[in-house]
Image (tube, rainbow, N blue to C red):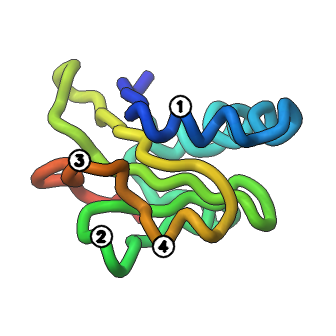
Amino acid sequence: MPTFETLPRLTTDLQHLTPAQRRRFRRVVLDAFVPDLRTGRQFRPSLRIKGVHCAPGVYELTWAPDGRATWSYGRTVVAGLPHVIWHRIGTHSILDRPLAEGHLAGQGGRLVG
């Protein structure tokens, strides 16, 4: 399983989601995002993963019609496994400030897909 970390801003953002929204995000990550990372192939189209224009190295993931999360690849923690850094979660409006304050996107990341 890929390794991951959550930044404090994501933890704060999660508190603003309803329990149903948190469950949906978790389900999308576990049922679609993680399996796609494991294969190393393209992400499935339903995740709508794409780069965030104002934040090189940061990607957005769609987990609901107006649900977005931003993330980047981080430095490898376990050899051979991707490491994901979760930055923000919420509605489409998080794309105005996709990075947690004071954090730069992971260096040397690559997008599969």
From this view, report whether residue 89 is shown above or below residue 15: below
Earlier sequence position, callout 3 versus callout 4: 4
The amino acid type of the residue labelled 2 equals Ala
Q: Crowdedness of circle 1 by 10 Å Cα count: few (<14), some, many (20+)?
A: some
**What distance separates the C-alpha of mark 2 from that of mark 4?**
10 Å
Earlier sequence position, callout 1 versus callout 3: 1
Which mark identifies residue 96? 4
Which mark identifies residue 86? none
**What distance separates the C-alpha of mark 3 from that of mark 4?**
15 Å
The amino acid type of the residue labelled 3 equals His
* Residue hosting label 1: 11
Earlier sequence position, callout 4 versus callout 1: 1
Q: What element carries label 1?
A: helix
Apparent side of residue 97 relative to residue 82 in the rendered image (left or right): right
The amino acid type of the residue labelled 1 equals Thr
- Percent position (x, y) of residue 26? 69, 32
**What distance separates the C-alpha of mark 4 from that of mark 1?**
18 Å
